[in-house]
Amino acid sequence: MKVSLEWLRELVDLDQSAEELAETLTRGGIEVENVENLNKGFEKVVIGEIVSLTKHPDADRLLVCAVNVGLEEVTIVTGAQNLLTGDRIPVALVGANLPNDLSIRKSKLRGVVSQGMLCSREELLLDGTIGLDRSAEGILILPTTAPIGENFGHYLGLEDSILDLELYPNRPDCLAMVNVAREVASLTRKKPHLPKWAEQNQVLSLPVVTDFRIIIEDQELCWRYAGLVVEDVHIASSPEWMQRRLKAAGVRPINNIVDITNYVMLEMGQPLHAFDRDKIEGDVHVRPAQPGEKIVTLDGVERTLQTHTLLIADDSQPLGVAGVMGGLYSEVTKDTKRLMIESAHFSSVSIRRTSRRLGLRSEASNRFEKGIDVSGIVAVLGRVCDLLTDLGAGRPVALVDEVRHLPSRRQITLSTEHTSTVLGIELQISEIRQVLEDLNFEYKEKSGLFQVEIPTYRSDLEIEEDLMEEVARLIGYDRIPTTLPQGDQTQGRRTPEQEFRRRLRKVLAQSGMDEVLTYTFTRAESDAQWGSAKHQIPLLNPLREELGVMRTSLIPGLLDVAARNVARRNMDVSIFEIGNTYWGEEQPLKKLPREELRVAAVAVGKSERHWRNQPISYDFYYLKGIMEGLALEFGLKLEFRVAENQSLLHPGRSADLYLQNQCVGFLGEIHPSLEKEWGLERAVIFELELSTLFKRIRHTVRAHSIPRFPAILRDLAVVVTVETSAEAVMAKIRKLGGDLLQQVEIFDVYTGKPIPEDHKSLAFSLRYQSIERTLTDEEVNLLNSRILEGIQQDFGAERRK
Amino acid sequence: MDLERVIYLKSEILRIREEALKELRELDSPEALQELKVRVLGKKGSLTALLRQMGSLSAEERPIMGQVVNEVRTRLEQAWEERSEELDAMALQKRLATEGIDITLPGTRVARGHYHPLTQVIEEIEDIFLGMGFQIAEGPEIESDYYNFEALNLPKEHPAREMQDSFYITDEILLRTQTSPVQIRTMEKLHPHLPVKIVAPGKVYRNDDDATHSPMFHQVEGLVVDRGIRMSDLKGILLNFSREMFGESREIRLRPSFFPFTEPSAEVDVSCMLCGGSGCRLCKGTGWIEILGSGMVHPKVLEMGGYNPQEVTGFAFGMGVERIAMLKFGIEDMRLLFDNDLRFLQQF
Ligand SMILES: [Zn+2]
């Protein structure tokens, strides 16, 4: 809602500047988004009179003017040819910043100092409607009555500011100037001066229309419909003051009749529509459209209407789409002699649907959608009558008012004590009384209990708490003190699952991976590749096609991030995400889907080069190491088995991850055949489902005592075929070593000379220790050689010398 | 005869002393030093050998000679000690002179990953409220129309629904547009238990995409329900939060606002963390920055959650995590948060 300060001043006493008022309103709950100063660009433009005109001594085409600008006379050099001594003209003085962004400075033109500029219509960005008559080329010549020295913007009546109100849906009343004035009056404790339209208005004494009826077919969709019949219509343009206010509100002036309807809508919030009475055949029907029914609307477009669209029609054809747009046929034209001006209620739901469907949104439809004051429908026509008479635009002759439903007036009980308790302020009865006085609400009070009569224009006030907000905002939210809840003390604590997620994130970040967050909606095809097409949940209205389904895997999002980074020359990427995947059990969804929390990672490239450290390649073992660290952190026995799905991952470099025989995810290098699609070379990934992981984590640690007897260390290097799995060899070593073998680690893997082709050397370090006694070299040597024999037998291994 | 012997022995002792001291000055290794010590003072050393010859001396001469030998021994031992210390000091000097390193070279790198800034902010918000006795509650991101709107006093066709452009899956199921449904879910689960005191962080979705809106973003919802909860309690809790989040000297102010599920409602501004309230570019000259929406829980919402609005009251608040992260870290374009460029992420 755009509010003209000049207009507002007529409706309420104001002693604040536009900016101060904006602050008052915002602090009072009516947010002012912007304050626009219409005089902008005219600050140093004044009206001047040409005192003398002389030829420039050194330039034939230039004139030197002496200009009286009120308190002084200035010299200005101009090239204009349409000037005479005594002309009054707009003068931009030094320092002016014109609306077309031209800055005026003191300058010298061929040796003569010029102290400003005489302005043309274009330089001032004035359109034709501003009410200045001589529209000749060149400098704008003003009437001889234009006061010398006066600010030009002020002279044009542009000294106005527009407050742009950002209204919450609960305050549609402020889509009317009179209600904005009431609001300002309440917040500044001033009395509003609203137009006297309701009492003893001529509209009340008009005869009832006899030559047609209003027929409301569906009273759910239209509660009330009033029509004002006007004769002796004289179509002309509306007065300048009305045009200016309409433009300030962003409404284009058309003619006196349309302008009056729009003006009253802006003033009182009730949309109005004027029909050419002579185009109405028989009765006026308010009815839903019939299948296939068509209408040509005011904008000249023929529209086929859907069956729920509410229409205004006569006996033979539709006259307009109710509340949204009138029909071309019944439009007011210069030849119109008689009018029917509609003031009605239409269901906000119906209007919203229609305006959406037709893609037509207007000041009128916006007000109907948010809800209008049904009780005020005829009073508004009273205001129309006054303006028609004042402007000589027509003579109101009859009124019809078909009422099907009037919302009852609300009464709310407001308790001083309850309000004090809820707000946490010790309020006096007198303070609440003052608030209700400021709001201009009627009330009865008995020992702090107020019976408040809610005016019909404040449809947002329904319960006591709504009035508490009125009290709070009028006495000021700053009056609310700061306290803390008085109830039982509570202990804030994360649930074990929340703590698990937090620790998981920490472990991964401490392993050197960066956390990313990606959109949970994604491309259907990529997600189907890594997740499950069958379970994908599509959005009905996605932002873009490629964000069309809820993800069933985190991998595509992470691969996208990795690829985008690599494309930007961030070559080394090691990232993870913890987030939900979404699993629909049926199509379309009948119940809420399962949301499955996962962790996934992508790594490509290598760790940074550094003079101390060898760069680590981001390969299978890199991610496996991170997974092992994770398993260690949470006490999980994670098993790596040969991957089952061999189409997405490199068959020789991938594993499925198992926890107690349950598959919980996978790890591996993406299949070389997919590298091109993703623009990534040798990327490794993993994805794990977290709920199973969480169920299996170790929650308590049982400490072992530190062994008292010394350990004996032995190294063992064997040569096996390259296919031999290191884990199998380790398992055999552990089995043969028994209780005395405390630990086995692989400390070296080697291929190449002198190891034969297709073979590798594995070097293990073994730690023997007993918790009961000191071991002897002999028994350890014996055990060690038994282990060697065992693996020689099982794997055809040779001891490496 | 005896006198000659005495003289001879004495001169031998002095010779040994002089030779040993001379040699000592020339030796430059601890090993050689030790060897010399053994050679002179050891069991088979020259001085020890001389001492044995003293058996032939008279009872009067013996102590005199003994004293001489002891003096020489002490003198030599002292000289050894000194020389040994000298050598140690020289060795240390030499070691220090050769072991210098370039301390300006960077240290061994320990891999360190980064939390996403939004996660950091969420954890910080959680921690602040945990410290004030709140629990952390959660709810589904794919929600029913009932929980996302209806139970929050937003019946179908309510004009306020238009404030939020939703992503729909079916007519009845959508991506939640706010974390507020967790209010209802929590109350349903906990009633009639009191107090309810939770924060609920999570992803929310609206059909919007530009420099200040992302179709997916994060909110943290808060809810407190108990007997006698006041709007001033809301102000107290949020003041504590603002000071912990943005600094001890922050102030807050409440402005009337509208949310369908709270009444009275308030927008909460915090004094600008950049200029402290005097006005700057960040706060657009006002000295205040809007950080969250809040209010007293609407009686209908309490009822929907299973509580009797005659007996209990509550307050609720909701804040945008992206906005707080942008304020906290000075991020100007929200899209950076979901672009996941490593050069951006690795700053946090
Ligand atoms: Zn500031």
Image: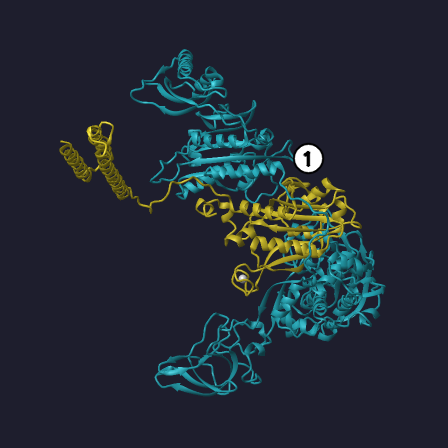
Chain colours: A cyan, B yellow
Position of A741 relative to A202 (above/below): above
Is residue B216 something that shows in the picture?
no
Quadrant of the frame with the C terminus of chain A: top left
Residue A519 sits above or below residue A318 on the image: above
Q: Nearer the viewer, residue A512 or B40?
A: B40
Q: Secondary structure at mark 1?
A: loop
- Location of residue A279 by image quarter: bottom right
Q: Is residue A408 left or right of residue B266?
A: right
Q: Which residue is mark 1?
A: A590
Q: Is residue A54 above or below residue A581?
A: below
A285 or A129: nearer the eye? A129
Q: Callout 1: residue from which chain? A: A
Q: Answer above or below: position of A324 versus B206.
A: below
Question: Residue A171 location, x and y as percent?
Answer: 70, 59
- Quarter-wise, where is residue A156 in the image? bottom right
Neighbours of disc 1 within 10 Å: few (<14), some (14-19), many (20+)? few
Q: Amino acid at mark 1?
A: Lys
From the top left corner, tell me how far across and down residue A610 is, in percent.
35, 40
In the image, taking residue A109 as reference, residue B85 lies left or right, namely: left
Ligand 1 visible in quadrant: bottom right
**Split into 4 quadrants, where in the image is the N terminus of chain A?**
bottom right
Q: Residue A102: give x, y in percent of width and height.
A: 46, 72
Q: Position of residue A667 (x, y in %)?
A: 48, 29
Q: Residue at image x 37%, y 36%?
A: A615
Position of residue B17 in the picture relative to residue A256 (left or right): left
